[in-house]
Image (tube, rainbow, N blue to C red):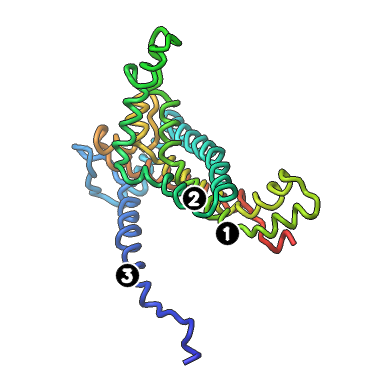
Amino acid sequence: MSGKVGRSPTWLAWPTYGVLILGILVPMAMIFVDSFRMRGTYGGLAPVEDLGAYLTSFQFLANYERALEPVYLKIIWRSLWMATLTTVACLVAAYPLAYWIVMRLPARSRSLAVLGIIIPFWTSFVVRTFAWVWILRTEGLINTFLMSLGLIDEPLPLLYNEGAVLLGLLYAELPFMILPIYASLERLDRSLLEASADLGASPFWTFWKVTWPLTLPGVAAGCVLVFVPSVGQFLISDMLGGSKSILMGNLIQNQFFGGKNAPFGFALAFVLTAVVFLILWLQPKLFKGASREDLL
């Protein structure tokens, strides 16, 4: 009996593997293959009559060559830049809040604070995003309030620009940064902080040398959870940015609903996927957290 304790039958994971293979890997493989096809008459997939000639002429690379044109590279760069700025802004806003909840609030109040963070998830994301349209528009809450106070003579252009998109991304992704950092701070061994103070370290150096390194795994997880959805976001940029702040997600969406060029949309999606995978591969090198043993 003792020899069987601790073993978990591998067949329990088969349903999960099946979902991953049939629901993710197989569709992605099909889309990857179709990304090398040509646009059909009505925007779908054109039939390949002579596969050998098609391959030797390198026509199958046409979609990826087009994706690397300057006009599309500019949109890719804008998407990466907006996602990076959103991630940094979320980190700057989330870490002090998570630190205050864990270190300053009594234990019985932390659950209410966390509940307040996740309450926005109880309502539709579209509804929450549209609320920002009502707040930022020319006749919206902010402009109406400022004009009633006599601080401005005409409405401010708060909507349909990159600033509005950044605000919407920050609002939407902030909880995904707070929760991993909160979990890391919750698991932090307080005796290490006390030992640092006993050895004469100031609160700043205690934070920098002990708290920050030990919570880097939570910071890294939060950055991934914020960056990945931000770089492919299309709803927020569509509702708050309009045509002036098109991102990669909007460009891909337009290939299926506006431009009607499905193969090019597949190619754009895989270019974006490759960039995200590269960043995720670099992520462990950027966040090298310290363990408890490293500090002792």
Residue 129 placement: quadrant: top left
* Residue annotated with mark 2: 109
Sooner in the amino-acid sequence: mark 2 or mark 3: 3
Q: Identity of the amino acid at label 3? A: Pro
Rendering coords of residue 10 (x, y %): 40, 77
Up-down relation of residue 179 to residue 233 (above or below): below
Q: Helix, strand, or loop for circle 3? A: helix
Relative to the observer, which residue lies in front, 120 or 88?
120
- Identified at 58% across, 53% down, the residue is 185
Query: Which residue type carries mark 1?
Result: Arg
State which tag comes first along the sequence, 3 or 1.
3
- Category of crowding for the residue at label 2, using alpha-carbon neighbours closer than 10 angstroms: few (below 14), some (14–19), many (at least 20): few
In the displayed structure image, the side of residue 140 where residue 111 appears, left or right: right
Q: CA distance from mark 2 to mark 3?
A: 39 Å
Q: Which mark is residue 131?
A: none
Q: Nearer the viewer, mark 3 or mark 1?
A: 1
Looking at the picture, tell me which residue is in the foreground, 40 or 284. 284
Residue that badge 3 annotates: 15
Q: Residues within 10 Å of mark 1 (few under 14, many from 20)?
A: few
Residue found at the far right of this picture: 200
Give amino acid for label 2.
Answer: Ser
Can you give x and y, in whole percent of width and height, for residue 44 in the image? 22, 42
Q: Position of residue 224 (x, y in %)?
A: 49, 48
| Label 1 sits on residue | 187
Q: Is residue 37 above or below residue 237?
A: below
